[in-house]
Amino acid sequence: MGMPVTRRQVLGFRVRAQQLDRAAGALEDTAVLDIGVQDTGPDGGLWALAVRGVDVSALTGDELATAWTIRGAPHLYLRSDLPAVAAATAPFSDADAGKRIFDASKPLKAAGISNLEALDTVAAAMRSVVTAPMVKGEMSGRLTALLPEPYLRFCRPCDATHVFEMPFRLAALRAGLELEPGTSPPVLRPVPGLTAAETVPPHLDVVRGQLRLLGPTTPKLVAGQGRHVHAAQCEGPQPAVRPGVLHAEVEHGGVGQVTGGAAELLGVHPQVEHLPAGEGREHGVSAAAGRCRRRTGPAGRRRGPTARSTTGRRPRRCSPTPAPRRRGSPR
């Protein structure tokens, strides 16, 4: 029998755990950097830090590093954590790697190449090619010339053959590469001396970080962050079912696990005026904010964030409405 909690309590837990009620705070004490802050759009990552009280105007650019990690998306991390992040975000097993690279695993399997071996091969090729900052397209073209057929696919939008996208992205940090911030198309550059750490510090453990920042969740939901369900359940360096992890039963039939003390779920639900676009999917707080109003983002532009309602109504989109993403855009 798990501890009964309401949906409102879970959302309140997430707002507090992710410091969305914090007026001001240091970059080094920002909890969501432990699992990465997705850097979507021209300033998505910095805006996510700004609404957590970080003075992003005071950053010099050396404190943070951007890397393709969870789901192959660009995420911000503390630069000092990058070796441990490389270890924490690496696949737990060959099956986990296969889940992360999607359809790229099929031709590899047919050729007798394991998924982990493939990531190592792509990483080695990247390392040999990128010795200075290089735009993604140029790097992709050079890799295509180096890698054999099981690593390649024909891309209709590009009308060209190149490396499968997910192995390309997930091998970059494995190769010691980071993304230059603010570049579009992306520019990758070597991080001098970067190698994955031997062990993962507890605060950077991805599975436990999901529990610590999201509250009650399940292996299936954690697997939605781009890993194999079995890996999320029991193969990680710190499996979800361990001492200090509580079983919770959320109203309307939800069941999950959460780290920390039960009292943290029972506090007063804080009010948050708005969240950056993408916060709901990334950090699970899609119904946690109060009223919506326009404000200036970290780059000085007026922004129209997504409204988040605590009344149970469907969230509405404040103007300006972002343009829909076009399908089939080129690499």
Image (cartoon, helix red, strand yellow):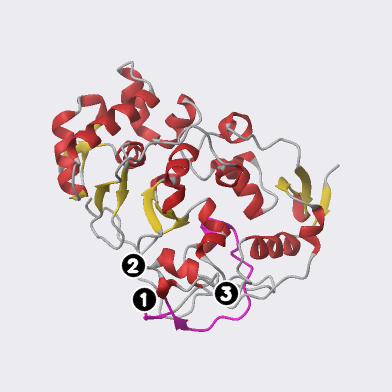
Proximity of marks 2 and 1: CB atoms separated by less than 8 Å:
yes
Q: Nearer the viewer, mark 3 or mark 1?
A: 3
- Residue reaching furthest right? 1
Q: Does residue 296 belong to the magenta stretch?
A: yes
Residue at numbered disc 3: 24
- Who comes first in sequence, dot 3 or dot 2? 3
Q: Mark 1 points at which residue?
A: 299
Is residue 174 among the parts visible in the rendering? yes
Rate crowding at label 2 as few (under 14), some (14 to 19) or many (20 or more) other CA atoms within 10 Å: few
Q: How far apart are the alpha carbons under marks 2 and 1?
A: 9 Å
The label number, if any, that marks residue 29 in the structure image = none
User: Pointers 3 and 2 in contact (CB under 8 A)?
Assistant: no
Q: In which quarter of the image is residue 284?
A: bottom right
Q: In this view, does 127 lie to the left or right of 261?
A: left
Q: How far apart are marks 3 and 1 (CA)?
A: 18 Å
Residue kind at label 3, given as amino acid type: Ala
